[in-house]
């Protein structure tokens, strides 16, 4: 059987070398989505390594979503979709999430999201408008005490606009960032008053611009919306830091 794999010459990190070989074959389209991989025994012979090294490599490839292991059926190259990229990037951002990253998130959003909103105004469908209108109505009627529901609706509004842009790359870039919005929103709402009313006003105006296909206005409004949210987040961070410093001084004061 002809395969794209070669015997491994170096003895160290065998499993990692196997991973690199198989990943390279997938990147170069020598292995295509849905294609069945050789069996463990065949891979051992092809790479001239032990079954332990092959199994560890397959475990790593499976964890990264590059291959799918089906019981009694075999191992197959995964059909990579945008959801894989979104999930991986979302995990990275979750693990790196801190106060500095909050401001980095807004910096990225203010560069990308206004243009995505412009595309949404250009390409939106009647179905997109209906989804945005329903979202706005739900947010307007949402119980202010239900922060989780409000955060989910806020995130949904921005996600729907991203989808309405009809650019398939936009969700891959923005959806992982949107997953952080509930955390950021909770921090801001806990420290800054009148945030919801401000967000609702912008959502209404942005929806109106998208509905009228006013691309320039939609872009400008989204930029203003993100800039205001960034200022609120920065103010919330300053308040949190001030409270933390005051608490630290109190602890150091003699009894």
Image (cartoon, helix red, strand yellow):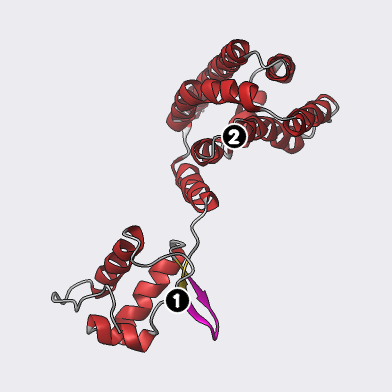
Where does residue 44 sit, x and y in percent of width and height? Answer: 29, 85
Where does residue 138 sit, x and y in percent of width and height? Answer: 82, 30
Magenta segment, prevailing SS (helix, strand or loop): strand
Instruction: Report the residue marked by disc 1.
Output: 36
Work out whether residue 93 can be spotted. Answer: yes
Which label belongs to residue 166? 2
The residue range painted magenta reads 68-75
Q: Residues within 10 Å of mark 2 (few under 14, many from 20)?
A: some
Work out whether residue 243 can be spotted. Answer: no
Vertical side of 205 occupied by 27: above or below: below
**Residue 7, image quadrant:** bottom left
Question: In the image shown, does 37 or 44 lie closer to the viewer?
Answer: 37
Q: Residue at x 60, y 32 (%)?
A: 162
Q: Residue at x 35, y 61 (%)?
A: 29
Vertical side of 177 occupied by 110: above or below: above
Q: CA distance from mark 2 to mark 1?
A: 33 Å
* Residue 208 shown in magenta: no
């Amino acid at each position: 059987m002809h395969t794209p794999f070669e015997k491994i010459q170096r003895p160290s990190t065998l499993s990692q070398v196997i991973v690199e070989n198989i990943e390279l074959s997938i990147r170069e389209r020598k292995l295509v989505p849905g294609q069945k991989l050789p069996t463990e025994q065949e891979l051992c012979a092809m790479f001239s390594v032990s079954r332990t090294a092959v199994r560890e490599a397959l475990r790593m490839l499976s964890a990264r979503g590059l291959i799918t292991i089906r019981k009694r059926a075999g191992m197959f190259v995964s059909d990579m979709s945008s959801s894989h990229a979104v999930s991986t990037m979302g995990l990275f951002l979750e693990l790196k999430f801190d106060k500095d990253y909050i401001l980095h998130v807004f910096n990225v959003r203010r560069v990308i999201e206004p243009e995505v909103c412009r595309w949404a105004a250009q390409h939106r469908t009647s179905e997109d408008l209906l989804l945005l209108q329903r979202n706005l109505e739900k947010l307007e009627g949402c119980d202010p005490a239900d922060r989780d529901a409000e955060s989910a609706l806020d995130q949904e509004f921005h996600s729907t606009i991203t989808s309405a842009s009809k650019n398939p790359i936009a969700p891959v870039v923005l959806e992982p960032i949107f997953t952080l919005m509930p955390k950021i929103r909770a921090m801001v709402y806990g420290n800054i008053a009148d945030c919801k009313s401000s967000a609702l006003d912008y959502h209404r105006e942005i929806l109106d611009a998208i509905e009228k296909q006013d691309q320039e206005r939609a872009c400008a409004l989204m930029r203003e919306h993100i800039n205001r949210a960034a200022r609120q987040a920065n103010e919330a961070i300053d308040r949190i830091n001030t409270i933390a410093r005051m608490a630290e001084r109190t602890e150091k004061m003699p009894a």
